[in-house]
């Protein structure tokens, strides 16, 4: 099933995709105090929600809503850097024994079809297509053999990066969390529909041109190992997001560099999930 966060009539809502529309779940779960997708996951109520979706007709058409980030209010957005060998090679770095970790913040992301914003301070606005996972059952020190069972589902992510600010120091965060520079969507595909996340294809397109193309079996640190490593450091909680890394082909390493600009359309497509599409606008 595909769960989605959205806004309609200026009210934040959540629901599930049914046909060409969305069954809104908030009113159906109000007696349980569940008002967001993150709360639904934390309440371990996704199976109940699936039953409600089967029993009800869509309340909203896609064209009548604005998509929000899949989880608008995650407690953590954990990003993994340099996790495909071709990306490591194009950056001139070397593969490390343990994954590179940095963070983004909720303000830095928008939903499907919403504009991502090139900030006033830079023209070096780069794309990064990635697979994101959302934690369903959290905890500390989650073993690799239990890791996939801890996942609620998967989504596409475009980890828009402001490259010159990223290079201000050896730490990535300055270039990774400008407001509204990344996107997360279009929806959360539940983990039962993707039993093996290592068998997915990923493609990023800029104005229809393929700029990144890879498969998730090429991740240096696979998803079970990422969950084990991250949960050793911190307690993973329902609704936390792990963005698993981008393959080679980023704009910064092309000759000449290929930066996103006002009027562009960027898409991240992952098999079994769908297409995350965003227009690019320049901040004014």
Image (cartoon, rainbow, N blue to C red):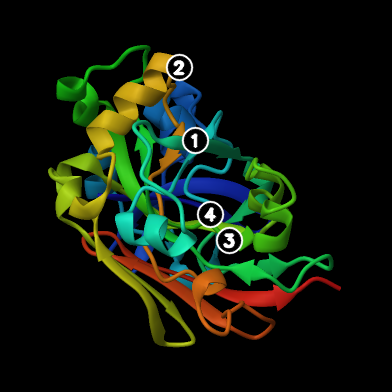
Comparing labels 1 and 4, the label whose residue is closer to the camera = 1
Q: Residue furthest top?
A: 140
Distance between the Cα atoms at labels 1 and 4? 29 Å
Asked whether residue 38 is in view, the answer is: yes
Left/right of residue 101 with respect to residue 169 in the rendered view: left
Comparing labels 2 and 4, the label whose residue is closer to the camera = 2
Give the residue number, with chain letter if any, for mark 2: 233
Give the residue number, with chain letter if any, for mark 3: 160
- Judging from the image, what secondary structure is the residue with disc 3 in? loop
Give the residue number, with chain letter if any, for mark 1: 101
Q: Compared with residue 140, is residue 7 higher up or lower down, i.e. above or below?
A: below
Q: Residue at x 68, y 53 (%)?
A: 167
User: Considering only order in the chain, which callout, 2 or 1, is on the residue closer to the N terminus?
Assistant: 1
User: Considering only order in the chain, which callout, 4 or 1, is on the residue closer to the N terminus?
Assistant: 4
Give the residue number, with chain letter if any, for mark 4: 6
Distance between the Cα atoms at labels 4 and 3? 21 Å
Dot 1 and dot 2 residues touching (CB under 8 Å): yes
Figure quadrant of residue 257: bottom right
Figure quadrant of residue 261: bottom right
User: Considering only order in the chain, which callout, 2 or 3, is on the residue closer to the N terminus?
Assistant: 3
User: Considering only order in the chain, which callout, 4 or 2, is on the residue closer to the N terminus?
Assistant: 4
Residue 138 lies, in percent from the top left, at 36, 19
Q: Residue at x 57, y 80 (%)?
A: 258
Distance between the Cα atoms at labels 1 and 2? 11 Å
Distance between the Cα atoms at labels 2 and 4? 32 Å
Dot 4 and dot 3 residues touching (CB under 8 Å): no
């Amino acid at each position: 099933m595909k769960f989605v966060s959205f806004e309609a009539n200026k009210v934040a809502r959540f629901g599930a995709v049914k046909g060409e529309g969305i069954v809104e779940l908030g009113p159906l779960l109000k007696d349980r105090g569940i008002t967001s997708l993150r709360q639904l996951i934390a309440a371990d109520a996704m199976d109940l929600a699936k039953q409600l979706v089967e029993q009800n007709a869509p309340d909203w058409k896609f064209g009548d809503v604005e998509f929000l980030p899949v989880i608008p209010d995650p407690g953590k957005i954990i990003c993994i850097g340099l996790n495909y060998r071709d990306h490591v090679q194009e950056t001139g770095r070397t593969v490390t024994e343990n994954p590179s970790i940095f963070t983004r913040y909720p303000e830095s992301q928008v939903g499907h079809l919403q504009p991502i914003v090139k900030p006033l301070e830079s023209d070096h606005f780069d794309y990064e297509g990635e697979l994101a996972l959302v934690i369903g059952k959290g905890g500390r020190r989650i073993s690799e053999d239990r890791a996939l069972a801890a996942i609620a589902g998967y989504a596409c992510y475009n980890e828009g990066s402001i490259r010159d600010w990223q290079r201000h120091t050896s730490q990535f965060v300055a270039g990774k969390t400008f407001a509204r520079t990344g996107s997360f969507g279009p929806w959360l595909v539940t983990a039962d529909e993707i039993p093996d996340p290592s068998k997915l294809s990923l493609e990023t397109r800029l104005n229809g041109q393929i700029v990144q193309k890879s498969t998730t079996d090429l991740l240096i640190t696979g998803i079970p190992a990422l969950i084990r490593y991250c949960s050793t450091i911190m307690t993973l909680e329902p609704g936390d997001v792990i963005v698993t890394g981008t393959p080679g082909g980023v704009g910064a390493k092309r000759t000449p560099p290929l930066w996103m600009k006002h009027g562009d359309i960027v898409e991240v497509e992952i098999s079994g999930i769908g297409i995350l599409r965003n227009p690019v606008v320049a901040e004014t």
